[in-house]
Each structure stands twice: as C-alpha cells, then as structure tokens.
Amino acid sequence: MTATVPPAPSAEGPIGDPRGRVELPPGALPEDSRFVNADLLPVPVAGRRWTTYNFAALWIGMAHNIPSWLLASGLVTLGMDWKQAVLTIALANVIVLLPMLLTGHAGPKYGIPFPVLARASFGLRGANLPALIRAAVACAWFGIQTWIGGQGIFVLLGKIFGGWTDASRIGGQPWTLWLCFLLFWALELAIIYRGMDTLRRFENWAAPFVIVGALVLLVWITVKAGGLGPLLDQPSELGWGAEFWPVFFPSLMGMIAFWSTLSLNIPDFTRFGAGQRAQIRGQALGLPTTMTLFALLSVFVTSGSQAVYGAAVWDPVELAAKTDNVFGLVFALVTVLVATISVNIAANVVSPAYDLANLAPKRINFRTGALITGVIGVLVMPWKLTATPELYIFTWLGLVGGLLGTVAGILIADYWIVRRTVLDLADLYRPGGRYWYAGGWNPRAVIAFVVGGVLAVGGSHSLPGTGPFPEDGLIPLLKPLADYGWAVGLVASAAVYLVLTLPSGRGGAKMVPYE
C-alpha cells in the first residue's frame, strides 16, 4: 500500500453508482486465483437489496434468544438489581453499535464479507488470523446455542410426552436429550445450507413471531400473578458504591462481548445492503432497542414467576414448561425453535462459513464452511462454558471480547483513518497487489494484534474455583486491565497500528517495501 487513495479506475477498474457502491466488471479477476471463490467475490450491486426492515428484523431475530434472556439473570445473580442489570445491558449495546456501524460500512459500499475486508489491513494471507479467531468463537457459540436450544426442546417435549425425560442415559444425559440436540443441529444446518437469501426470508418472519411469543409469555405470567411480583422491589446487593463498580465494569465488557463477534463480521450481512442508510438505520433500530426491551421483558416475566411460584424462574423454557396447556406448550416449543435457529444461523454459522472459505477458497465454499462449523460446534462441549455466571460472563465473554476488540481496533483504524474508506477492490483478491505486503502478511497488523491482545487478556484472572486463570492473573502486572478487555484491546491495537502505519503522516507511504 502506497497511499490511502487508489488510482482512478481505468476502463477495466471498479464501477461506481450514485449511492457510492462499487463493483467489479465481469472478468476483472482471474478465475484461477487461489484467493477467489464465488462466495468471497463482491456481491453485485443488483444483488444488494436488503432494506432497513431486513437489517432490523435480522437483529430482532438474533437478539430474541435464550442466552440474551438469561443475560439479565446472570447480572442479578451477581448482585445487581433489575435496574442496574438493564442499564448495563443497554449501555453495552449502545457502545458496541458504534464499531458495528463502522465495520459495516464496507459491506454496502464494496459488497465484500469480513475476511476479505480484513485482507486490506492484515494482508491476503494474514487475514486468516482474525478470520480463524472469529470462526473459532462462532463455532463455540454455535455449540452453546444449539445445546441450549436442544435442552429447551427436550424440556418442552418432556411435558408433552410423559416419560421423555426419564430415558436411559448416555454420557451422563438422557439419550432423548442427545436426540433433541442432534435433530436441532441438523435443522439449523439444513436452513443455512440453502444460502443467504433463505436466511433473509427466515429472519423476516421469525422476528415478529418471536416478539409475539415473548409477549404471550409476559401476558400469561402477569395474569397468573394478578400483576407483577416483588422482584422489581428487591434492592441491589451491591448498591451504587464501592462494591458495585468492580462488578459493573467487567460485566459491561462481558455484555459488549456478547455482540462484539458481530461487530467484526457484520460486513457478511451488510454486503447485501441496498445502501448505507439501510444498514445504519436498520442496525440502530434493531440492536440497542431490542436488547434493552428484551432485558426488561426478562425481568418482568421473572418478577411474575416469583409472585406465582415463590422463586424467580429466569429460564423461559423452564417457566413455559410449568403450564399444563398442550397448546401453550406447543407454542412455546415452536417459539424456542424459531428464536434459537434465528440467532444461531445468522450470528454463528454465516461468519465461520465465510472465514473457513477464506482459508482455502478453492477447497472450501460457504456450504462446506457451514458444515465444518456444525461439526466443531458439537466437539467443543459448550455446556461447560455456561456452567456458572462467573465462568460465562467474566471468563468466556471477557476473553472473547478482549481478542475481538483487538481485531476491531485494527480494522477500524485501517479502513477509516489510513484508507478513509477507499479500497482497491480488485487488489483484495490479487497476490502481489497493494495488500500483499510481505508474502501476504502485514507485519504491522500482526504486531498491533499481539500487543493489543496481550494488554487485553494478559491480566485474565479467576477467583479460586470459578475459572481457569490464576487468581493474580496470567500476567499479574496487567490484572487491572482485565476488567476492561474489549476497550483496552480496541484502543491499544488501533493506536499501535496507526503508529506503525502512519509514521510520516502520509497515509502509509513507508509501507512501500512490503509491496
């Protein structure tokens, strides 16, 4: 890379349109390039037709799922009251929306997925580093969501068919639970195997259906309780003083980490957007509002359950299973199916499918990547990650957030500050071009990633018996930074990358030796 602005396009160069969208003319890239396959190529402008509603529906469908519902319960378990829990979730989603919109900008403009965007900063080969990190996280999340969804189906079917939950055990679990898990797993992959347009249509009707399902649950428990119960009056165990902030900040980072995955690979979806307005409005309407309202809904329903059953029931599946109405059980079963499939195939299969395709474009396409994701998601034994709130929020989400924040910092700094949103679209697929750097790797991005990653997660620590890290932190000196892992990773990696990339203030002119 020799400048932030590529040369003016020639007759064979990119084609622009009045909305600022860019596409390559036919035949602009050699078909035998090892960095090209049909799934990684830019979406033609004619194919970029997702509207504001499509993006809002995508987020509504993704946000309305069991783990999202359980976020508030995890924070209350840690000692917050419902107001503190909802505030933490709302603030986290407003914060994470900003990098979501910044990285999402390249999608409608160039029609490229996340791993191809990462080639601009990490290099054509180096992009596999952030892509595989994102893929690994998604595979684990896919397993978590599939296991939770399978459990929900298992519980509800147990109410419909007596004796279902008393089946003989395999590996410590009833074989009927394993059957629910595997059938649910197969259903998810069958939907995503049909491609992104099928996903768009599924999300369009899944979003309102899941909202209706959640509201039905609220109305049902409110009627049974004769009004909402005493949970809303419960005081915080932490207060707003010295005991609150040490729990608040790592919890905030954990809530940010919940969607920090999508803040990286959101171009996988925005590449189908009709324009910037559609992705900006759709995401702003869909993410922070939906997550906040869903957290409130979780608290209200749980409050009603405490009034009815004498104890707070945070799990919506467990609560729905308490009804003896067969129609209600079937409706709850379908709602759990739709909600979990909606988030899992969108958030946790699309990204690794593209990321794995980027690893070996000539051998792995989108569908093959999706199948690999499904297999890995089964092998990671995800049920262990959600065993306790400490392990789930502090260890899993905190570690993930630190690493993904580091990648986001580099991508945002490169795209918005170094390149000012101008990319050479063809060179993103060409060996030897401006994004080839040193043998396909950009050393500056790798250095920034290592520095940011160490600062973000090097101080990871656990209380005795609550996690895998030493009590004093992996690197004791960095322990104070661990509670702010996502923010530390994002800011540190961006700063290091800019210092290394713009030493002369000329937009990266000193990177000439790496062409």
Image (tube, rainbow, N blue to C red):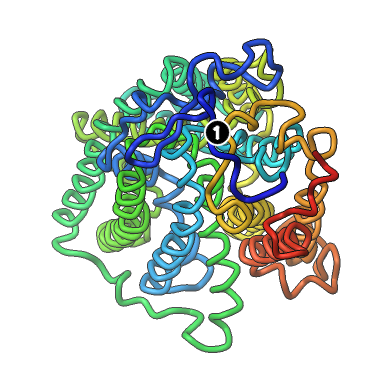
173 sits to left or right of 89: right
Which quadrant is home to the C terminus? Answer: top right
Q: Is residue 234 above or below residue 401?
A: below
Residue displayed at 54% across by 41% down: 265
Q: Quadrant of the N terminus?
A: top right
Instruction: Depth check: give the residue in front, 213 or 418.
Output: 418
Query: Looking at the image, is 459 positioned above or below residue 272?
Result: below
Image vertical order of residue 133 relative to residue 461, above or below: above
Q: Foreground: 481 or 462? A: 481
Give the image location of residue 389, x and y in percent.
57, 58
Q: Is there any visible trace of residue 112 in the rendered image?
A: yes
Give x and y (percent) for residue 300: 27, 61
Where on the picture, by quarter, is residue 54?
top left
Q: Is residue 458 left or right of residue 101?
A: right
User: Looking at the picture, how far across and down is residue 155, in whole percent?
Assistant: 41, 33
Q: Which residue is mark 1?
A: 351
Q: Residues within 10 Å of mark 1 (few under 14, many from 20)?
A: many
- Circle 1: residue type: Ser
In the structure shown, which secondary structural element does the residue marked by tag 1 occupy? helix
Residue at left offset 49%, top offset 35%: 268
Residue 353 lies, with reference to residue 515, above or below; the image says above
